[in-house]
Image (spheres, grey):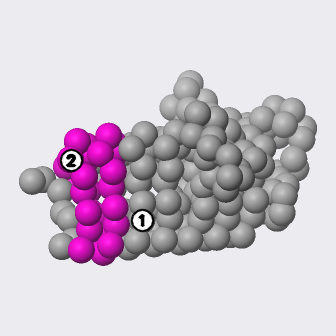
Amino acid sequence: MKYTVHKTAIIDEDAIIGEGSRIWHFAHVCGGATIGMNCTIGQNVFVGNKAKIADNCKVQNNVSIYDNVTLEEDVFCGPSMVFTNVYNPRAQIERKDEYRNTLIKRGATLGANCTIICGVTIGEYAFVGAGALANKDVKPYALVVGVPAKQIGWISEFGEKLDLPLNGQHEVICPNTQQKYRLDGNRLTAIDNQQSKT
Protein backbone atom coordinates (compact mmCIF):
# COMPACT_ATOMS: atom_id res chain seq x y z
CA MET A 1 0.00 0.00 0.00
CA LYS A 2 1.53 3.29 -1.13
CA TYR A 3 -0.80 5.54 0.85
CA THR A 4 -1.41 6.00 4.59
CA VAL A 5 -4.66 5.05 6.34
CA HIS A 6 -5.30 5.57 10.05
CA LYS A 7 -6.49 2.41 11.82
CA THR A 8 -9.89 4.00 12.57
CA ALA A 9 -10.60 4.91 8.93
CA ILE A 10 -12.82 2.74 6.72
CA ILE A 11 -11.82 2.17 3.09
CA ASP A 12 -14.41 0.18 1.17
CA GLU A 13 -13.46 -2.32 -1.50
CA ASP A 14 -13.02 -0.81 -5.00
CA ALA A 15 -12.08 2.63 -3.72
CA ILE A 16 -9.12 4.03 -5.68
CA ILE A 17 -6.52 5.97 -3.67
CA GLY A 18 -3.38 7.46 -5.18
CA GLU A 19 0.18 7.14 -3.98
CA GLY A 20 1.23 9.42 -1.14
CA SER A 21 -2.29 10.22 0.04
CA ARG A 22 -3.16 10.20 3.74
CA ILE A 23 -6.54 9.19 5.17
CA TRP A 24 -6.98 10.26 8.80
CA HIS A 25 -9.09 9.29 11.85
CA PHE A 26 -12.67 8.03 11.34
CA ALA A 27 -12.77 8.89 7.62
CA HIS A 28 -14.94 6.71 5.35
CA VAL A 29 -14.09 6.28 1.67
CA CYS A 30 -16.82 4.40 -0.22
CA GLY A 31 -16.23 1.83 -2.95
CA GLY A 32 -16.03 3.50 -6.35
CA ALA A 33 -14.64 6.74 -4.95
CA THR A 34 -11.48 8.07 -6.57
CA ILE A 35 -8.80 9.95 -4.63
CA GLY A 36 -5.67 11.12 -6.45
CA MET A 37 -2.05 11.26 -5.37
CA ASN A 38 -0.72 13.25 -2.42
CA CYS A 39 -4.15 14.14 -1.02
CA THR A 40 -4.94 14.72 2.63
CA ILE A 41 -8.33 13.47 3.82
CA GLY A 42 -8.93 14.80 7.35
CA GLN A 43 -10.70 13.39 10.36
CA ASN A 44 -14.35 12.35 10.02
CA VAL A 45 -14.43 12.96 6.25
CA PHE A 46 -16.90 11.02 4.09
CA VAL A 47 -16.17 10.36 0.40
CA GLY A 48 -19.11 9.00 -1.63
CA ASN A 49 -19.15 6.26 -4.26
CA LYS A 50 -19.20 8.65 -7.22
CA ALA A 51 -16.98 11.36 -5.75
CA LYS A 52 -13.80 12.24 -7.63
CA ILE A 53 -10.86 13.93 -5.92
CA ALA A 54 -7.84 14.76 -8.10
CA ASP A 55 -4.19 15.04 -7.04
CA ASN A 56 -2.90 17.23 -4.21
CA CYS A 57 -6.27 18.13 -2.67
CA LYS A 58 -6.64 18.89 1.02
CA VAL A 59 -9.97 18.08 2.67
CA GLN A 60 -10.08 19.28 6.27
CA ASN A 61 -12.04 17.69 9.14
CA ASN A 62 -15.80 17.01 9.09
CA VAL A 63 -16.43 17.39 5.33
CA SER A 64 -18.67 15.10 3.24
CA ILE A 65 -17.77 14.80 -0.45
CA TYR A 66 -21.02 13.40 -1.84
CA ASP A 67 -21.74 11.58 -5.11
CA ASN A 68 -21.40 13.75 -8.23
CA VAL A 69 -18.90 16.11 -6.58
CA THR A 70 -15.61 16.51 -8.46
CA LEU A 71 -12.54 18.25 -7.06
CA GLU A 72 -9.85 19.05 -9.62
CA GLU A 73 -6.16 19.30 -8.65
CA ASP A 74 -5.00 21.42 -5.70
CA VAL A 75 -8.45 22.13 -4.21
CA PHE A 76 -8.65 23.08 -0.53
CA CYS A 77 -11.83 22.27 1.44
CA GLY A 78 -11.86 24.01 4.82
CA PRO A 79 -13.11 22.43 8.05
CA SER A 80 -16.84 21.63 8.22
CA MET A 81 -17.63 23.11 4.81
CA VAL A 82 -20.72 21.60 3.18
CA PHE A 83 -21.60 20.17 -0.22
CA THR A 84 -25.19 19.33 -1.14
CA ASN A 85 -26.29 16.85 -3.79
CA VAL A 86 -30.05 17.45 -4.13
CA TYR A 87 -31.38 20.95 -4.74
CA ASN A 88 -34.73 20.58 -2.97
CA PRO A 89 -34.47 17.65 -0.53
CA ARG A 90 -37.42 16.22 1.40
CA ALA A 91 -37.06 13.37 3.87
CA GLN A 92 -40.19 11.63 2.56
CA ILE A 93 -39.28 11.85 -1.16
CA GLU A 94 -36.51 9.74 -2.72
CA ARG A 95 -34.42 11.94 -5.04
CA LYS A 96 -31.23 9.95 -5.62
CA ASP A 97 -31.82 10.17 -9.37
CA GLU A 98 -31.81 13.98 -9.13
CA TYR A 99 -28.23 14.48 -7.91
CA ARG A 100 -26.63 17.49 -9.60
CA ASN A 101 -23.00 17.58 -10.68
CA THR A 102 -20.82 19.94 -8.68
CA LEU A 103 -17.40 20.90 -10.04
CA ILE A 104 -14.64 22.58 -8.05
CA LYS A 105 -11.94 23.60 -10.50
CA ARG A 106 -8.19 23.54 -10.07
CA GLY A 107 -6.67 25.49 -7.19
CA ALA A 108 -9.95 26.72 -5.68
CA THR A 109 -10.30 27.30 -1.94
CA LEU A 110 -13.53 26.61 -0.05
CA GLY A 111 -13.36 28.30 3.35
CA ALA A 112 -14.39 26.82 6.69
CA ASN A 113 -18.15 26.32 7.15
CA CYS A 114 -19.04 27.55 3.65
CA THR A 115 -21.80 25.80 1.70
CA ILE A 116 -21.65 24.87 -1.99
CA ILE A 117 -25.11 24.22 -3.47
CA CYS A 118 -25.23 21.29 -5.89
CA GLY A 119 -24.96 22.03 -9.59
CA VAL A 120 -22.54 24.91 -9.05
CA THR A 121 -19.10 25.26 -10.66
CA ILE A 122 -16.39 27.05 -8.69
CA GLY A 123 -13.81 28.44 -11.13
CA GLU A 124 -10.05 27.96 -11.14
CA TYR A 125 -8.30 29.51 -8.13
CA ALA A 126 -11.52 31.10 -6.87
CA PHE A 127 -11.79 31.69 -3.14
CA VAL A 128 -15.09 31.12 -1.30
CA GLY A 129 -14.82 32.84 2.09
CA ALA A 130 -15.55 31.17 5.41
CA GLY A 131 -19.27 30.80 6.07
CA ALA A 132 -20.32 31.87 2.55
CA LEU A 133 -23.17 30.25 0.60
CA ALA A 134 -22.31 29.69 -3.07
CA ASN A 135 -25.63 29.13 -4.84
CA LYS A 136 -24.42 30.04 -8.34
CA ASP A 137 -21.26 29.61 -10.40
CA VAL A 138 -18.17 31.47 -9.22
CA LYS A 139 -15.78 32.92 -11.82
CA PRO A 140 -12.10 31.95 -11.96
CA TYR A 141 -9.96 33.97 -9.52
CA ALA A 142 -13.06 35.53 -7.90
CA LEU A 143 -13.13 36.23 -4.16
CA VAL A 144 -16.68 35.74 -2.85
CA VAL A 145 -18.13 36.12 0.65
CA GLY A 146 -21.52 36.30 2.35
CA VAL A 147 -24.95 34.68 2.21
CA PRO A 148 -25.63 34.39 -0.64
CA ALA A 149 -22.03 34.73 -1.83
CA LYS A 150 -21.19 37.95 -3.66
CA GLN A 151 -17.93 38.82 -5.36
CA ILE A 152 -15.88 41.42 -3.50
CA GLY A 153 -12.62 41.17 -5.42
CA TRP A 154 -10.06 39.05 -7.21
CA ILE A 155 -7.40 36.69 -5.85
CA SER A 156 -4.13 35.36 -7.28
CA GLU A 157 -3.07 31.73 -7.61
CA PHE A 158 -0.84 32.36 -4.59
CA GLY A 159 -3.90 33.42 -2.55
CA GLU A 160 -3.11 37.15 -2.49
CA LYS A 161 -5.98 39.65 -2.91
CA LEU A 162 -5.36 41.66 -6.08
CA ASP A 163 -5.87 45.41 -6.26
CA LEU A 164 -8.38 45.43 -9.10
CA PRO A 165 -11.95 46.66 -9.69
CA LEU A 166 -14.64 44.07 -10.44
CA ASN A 167 -14.94 45.25 -14.06
CA GLY A 168 -12.82 47.06 -16.62
CA GLN A 169 -9.52 46.77 -18.47
CA HIS A 170 -6.56 46.45 -16.13
CA GLU A 171 -3.38 44.51 -15.45
CA VAL A 172 -1.79 43.74 -12.10
CA ILE A 173 1.16 41.73 -10.77
CA CYS A 174 0.94 39.45 -7.74
CA PRO A 175 3.47 40.87 -5.24
CA ASN A 176 4.49 37.40 -4.05
CA THR A 177 5.06 35.55 -7.32
CA GLN A 178 5.35 38.34 -9.94
CA GLN A 179 2.65 36.52 -11.95
CA LYS A 180 0.78 39.00 -14.15
CA TYR A 181 -3.03 39.04 -14.39
CA ARG A 182 -5.26 40.78 -16.92
CA LEU A 183 -8.83 41.91 -16.24
CA ASP A 184 -10.92 42.07 -19.40
CA GLY A 185 -14.47 43.13 -18.65
CA ASN A 186 -15.45 40.96 -15.71
CA ARG A 187 -13.06 38.05 -16.41
CA LEU A 188 -9.59 37.71 -14.93
CA THR A 189 -6.90 35.60 -16.56
CA ALA A 190 -3.29 34.83 -15.69
CA ILE A 191 -0.83 35.91 -18.36
CA ASP A 192 2.07 33.66 -19.27
CA ASN A 193 5.01 35.66 -17.96
CA GLN A 194 7.41 34.22 -20.51
CA GLN A 195 5.08 35.12 -23.35
CA SER A 196 4.55 38.65 -21.99
CA LYS A 197 8.33 39.26 -22.00
CA THR A 198 8.74 38.50 -25.73
Q: Position of residue 137 (x, y in %)?
A: 74, 41
Q: Is residue 9 magenta?
A: yes
Tell me the residue at 24%/74% (across/down): 8
Q: Which residues are magenta?
A: 8-35
Residue at horizontal 81 percent and vertical 57 percent from the top? 149
Vertically, is 17 above or below 176? Answer: above
Marks 2 and 1 sit apart, C-alpha to C-alpha, by: 17 Å
Instruction: Identify which residue, 106 or 175, lies in the foreground.
Output: 106
Amino acid on which disc 1 is placed: Val
Choose top left, top right, bottom left or bottom right for residue 176: bottom right
From what the image shows, is residue 166 above or below residue 44?
above
Residue 3 horizontal/vertical position (percent): 18, 57
Per the image, is 197 magenta?
Answer: no
Res. 97 visible in picture: yes
Q: Which residue is mark 1?
A: 45
Say what secondary structure mark 1 lies in: loop
* Kind of element beneath mark 2: loop
Q: From this view, report whether residue 46 is shown above or below residue 17.
A: below
Q: Nearer the viewer, residue 119 or 87?
A: 87
What residue type is disc 2 on?
Glu
* Residue designated by label 2: 13
Q: Residue furthest left?
A: 1
x and y percentages locating residue 84 in the rendered image = 63, 52
